[in-house]
Structures are given as structure tokens and as C-alpha cells.
Amino acid sequence: MEKKKNLFALMTDKKHRGRTVSFGIVILGWAILEIMLFSGSLSSLFSSLLVPVCCYIVAAIGLNLNVGISGELNLGQACFMSVGAFTAVCLSGSLAGAIPAPLPRLLLSIVAGALLAALFGVLIGIPVLKLEGDYLAIVTLAFGQIIKSLITNMYLGFDDAGFHFSFVDNKVELKQGGKMLLNGPMGATGTERISTFTMGIVLIVIALIVVYHLMYSRSGRAIMAARDNRIAAESIGVEIFRTKMLAFTVSSCLAGAAGALYGLNYSTLVPAKFDFNTSILLLVYVVLGGLGNMTGTIIATIVLVLLPELLRSMQDYRMLIYAIVLILIMLLTNNETVRTWGERMKKQLKSRLKNRRNA
Amino acid sequence: MDFLSYLINGLGLGSVYAIIALGYTMVYGIAKMLNFAHGDVIMVGAYVAFFSISDLGMPLIPSVLLSVAVCTVLGVVIERLAYKPLRSASALSVLITAIGVSYFLQNAAQLLWSSSTKVFPSVISNGGISWNGLTVSWLTLITIGVCILVMICLVLFINHTKTGRAMRACSEDKDASTLMGINVNLMISITFAIGSGLAAIASVLLCAAYPSVFPTLGAMPGIKAFTAAVFGGIGSIPGAFLGGLLLGVIEIFAKAYISTQLSDAIVFAVLILVLLIKPTGLLGKRIREKV
């Protein structure tokens, strides 16, 4: 009769536990925040952080697929967010007349942003994944810088006669009623803010479904095998380049979707927003949350985005404290004494729970 | 003549990159870590030099020496407090710690010295040598000279002293070096000390050319110099020198002949091209993986 487990058993068995916990956290968090939003007990500061947090979570989940599961250090995740964001902003801006309803336009923009970012992922992945280790990392950094400086030099306008594009020097001249979509270093201005918190939660859920599905599939096992031992994986017929490319593309696609949502959440967006520091920030979320651990990534992102806001009373010292916390966490989690102590506590807790269950 | 003057300016800028890149490459060679806080050590060096020149009224050479001393101590302290406990940790943990240190230095500088830009006093006279219509400023000449001097001293030190030999041994194999009686921790500290001291020298040269001092001053030169180190093959000292010079020349040429706005993109595109043709940089060694 062991043929079909019931749903509860399926959700709590060892393989699926992590999945259940991360979906649980997201849905619970969504429910609580919706209630708080509804009753108006959330300060305007925190409610303005809801959408960006969702965006960072989605991009960080993507990055964790790349860094944690595929094992390749990516220092340019923000550039895919940038591609997604500016694609979405341009599309949404130019479709404002054709599709006045915000939701279909938002969906369409996110899909477009994600697809274009995935395309960039493939194009950038071809040279990047030929390299190894720190050289791979520096090339992702280089691509991040290149994309940032290309977008900083783009001018795109839109009027009755269609699109007008110019590069480096602004030569776009628009007729009456035309609209500037991209304005070089000033980026996109006057964007209609159509992102919603619900859409952010939907994106997180989609990202989790995609990543977990990939992790526990044949391709996912191949990706992890390629990470753990490249030569052994190759010898049993895993195509290293193809599997790594899959992880890289999905990762950049998620970052693109996250960027699209982020871009449509602000009325102005400068290309410099998605610079090296943003890539690093995402990497910090991933490493603090634990490599390959999606639940950890979600929690780490929430905590680290909120930390500077919670420290607001410290004013000037908050970023200093943030830095110290970062260093201390890294030192403590790698400290032998702290580690053995943590493991002992875990064991004690487990045996105590067992005793209680037996009693 | 334009071409020659661009070339010399490029070599001047490249010399600064090369000196910074030496710090990256030496630390990578011995500790196998990307020290992202290196750029911020440059910033601290710039502030120390700025205050000792304009507030204390010290002459140039003593203030450079003071800056070198402060940065050397800073480098060693950072290594002892933040990186040494992580010797056996994963490379990513060390990377994140280095980023934490970088945030710390930037924000500490902002608190101590405010985020407003300070103007670095002009320390090197404006004139230069003119020859056949080609003018080379003193600053460029001094920068190139300092870079060559640093390079010669470093090569002599690494190749011909006992400490240098011990450092090379550590970068080859730490365990075997320990067995041979080399104090590996001391060698790593010395490497950080030299790298940070060089960063201080670079900071003064950088500020003499671009006279503004602010808390995130080190970020961009840091990334560029890191690129230069990879360009030449990270871990290789002549590689860092060559990579730095080439990067500077490419940047100035890109600015002069193609586009000022796109110069960064061009520099990084060249880096990608070089790495595709030679995956371990210009002078990097290829380590064969054994099964």
C-alpha cells in the first residue's frame, strides 16, 4: 500500500522538504503582508520596499542557480536585470496607447524583458562558459560593465512616425506628442508605475517552480555533476557546456523578469542603478543564504534589504554596521568552534524532539 | 605627433594601473583570493596624502612615505583580522568578506571625512619636456619612472632575496613550504604589506593626475587594475605590469580615436577578446588538471 503517498507525506519527505518550506514562506509572507497592507498597518517606507524585495529575490534565486547549483561565479547578474528593466520600460511606454490596461501590459513587458535577457544570456554565455574559475568571473564582470555603458549611451524615442534610435550622441528629434523612452545616462523617465506586489509574489513562485523543477530533473543532476567533478561528469557523457549554458540562460532569464518588474516600479530609472555593486549585492544575498539553498536566499535577501532600513535610527552608521555584520557573519559561519557548537546544538535539539515524540 | 602623445599619456595612465594591479596579482598568487578591498586601500592612501599635504603642510615625499606606512599597516591589519581566519574557508566566503571590508572602508571614510569631494593640491609642477612639438608633462614622466622603479625593485626582491624565494615557494605549494620551515602566514602578511604600500604610491600618482578625493575613489581604478591583472595573467608579476600598461594605452586610444563615453566598454571588450584567445591571460600559466 506504499504506492501513493498522501500529499502531506509527499510534502514533508526528505526530498521535498526544502521546496515546501520555501513555498510556505513565500505564501505565508504574501498573506501576512496583504492583510497588513489592507489594514493599513504597514508604513509607507516598508510598502515601498515590497516590490524591490520581490525583484531582488527573483534575481538572487536565478543567481543561486548559477553560482550554487552550476558552480560558476557570476559577477554580472545586474546587467541581465538591466536588459530586462529597460526592455520592459520601453515596451510598456510604447504600448501605453495600444494596451491601456496595466495588467496585460505588465505581463507582456515582463515576458519580453525575460526573453531578451535570456537571449543576452545565451550570447554572453557562449564566450563566458568557455573559460574557467576566476577568469569566468572577470568576464561576467566585463560584460556587466559593457552592457551598462552601452545602455548609458542609448537614445530611443517614439512618435507617430515610429521609433527613432541614436547611439552615443543624442540625435533623436521627435514630432509633437512623441515620447523619449531612453535618454542616455538619464535613463528612462516618466515611466508609468504598473508593477504590483502580487505580481512580485507570482514571479517568486514561478522562479521557485522553475529552479526546483530544474534541480530535481535529469538536466539538474547533470549540472550538479558538472559542478562537483567536471572530468568525471564528462567521462560519463555529460555535455558540460550545454548543461552550464542551460543554468546560465535560466538564471539570466529570471534576472530579466526581475529587472522588468523593478523597472516598471519606478517612474525614473538610471542605467547606473544596475552596476557592479548591484551584482555584488545579489551575490552577497546568495552566499549568505547558502549556496544552492533557495529558502536561504529568500530569507537572506529579505533580511539584508531590510537591515539598512531597520538601522535607520543609527543614521550615518547604518552602512558601517551593515559592513561589520557582513564580515562577522562570514567569520562566524566559517569558525571551527562556532560550527561544532552549532552542530552540537542541532543534535541535542533533534534528540530532545525524538524523546518527546517517544514519550 | 598626436599618436605619440596619446601613447605616452596611455603609458602614464597604464603605469598607475600596473602598480595597483601588482597588488592584486601578488595577493592572488600567494593567497589565491580576489582582494576586492584593494581599491579602497588606494582611497585611504589618497586621503592620508591629502591631509598630510594640505592640512599638515608636509612636503610631497614625506607625505607619500606616511601614506605608504599607513596603507601598509592597514593592509596587514585587514589581512590578520578578516582574511586569516578564513584561510581554509571557501573562496566565495573570502570574496564576500573582502566585499564587506570594502564597504567598511568606504563607509568609514564617508563618516570620518564626509562624502564631499576634496580637491587634491597640485604637487607636481605643470610644465614638461617639449621636443619637436611633442610635450610630455612631468607628471607622466614621473609616473612612468616610478612604475619602472617599482617593477625593477619588485623583480629583484622576488627573485633574489630569501624572503622573495619563500614567497614564491608559498604560492607554488603552501604545505610543502610549511614543511621546509617557511612561515606561510608571515609571507602572506608581507605580500599584503607590499601590495598595500604600492597602492598608496599609486593613489598619490592617481590623485596628481585626477585631483579629486572622495570615498569611492578607489572603486573604478580598482576594477580597471583588476582587469589589468587578469589581462596579463593573474598571479604573474610581469603580467600585471604588461596588462596595466596595455590597458592604459588602450583606454587612452579608445578615448582619443573612438569615443570618450564608450572607452570603458572598449577596454572590457578587448579583455574578453584576449581571454577568448588566451584563456589564462597574456603571461598566465596554464595549470593542467590531473585526474
Image (spheres, coloured by chain):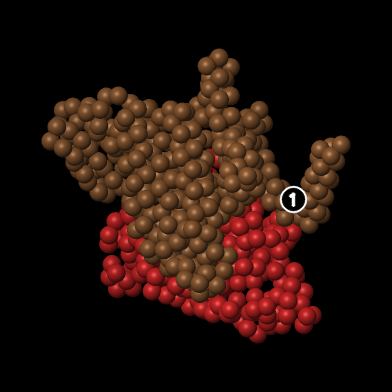
Q: Residue at x 55, y 15 (%)?
A: A40
Side (left or right) of A183 relative to A215: left
Residue B49 position by quadrant: bottom right
- On the image, the x and y values in percent for residue A46 come to 55, 26
How far across and how far down the image is residue A167, in percent?
25, 49
Image position, residue A303 (x, y; %)? 62, 37
User: Dot 1 falls on which chain?
Assistant: A
- The one of A62 and B267 positioned closer to us in this rendering: A62
The residue most toward the left is A161
Q: Is residue B173 visible?
A: yes
- The colour assigned to chain B within the rendered structure: red
Label 1 secondary element: helix
| Residue type for callout 1 | Leu
Q: Is residue A222 left or right of residue B62?
A: left
Question: Which residue is more in the foreground, A256 or B210?
Answer: A256
Chain A tint as drawn: brown
Quarter-of-image position of residue B182: bottom right
**Pointer 1 residue:** A332
Quadrant where the N terminus of chain B sits is: bottom left
Identify the residue at image location x=22%, y=27%.
A97
Question: Residue A99, position in %: x, y?
Answer: 25, 27
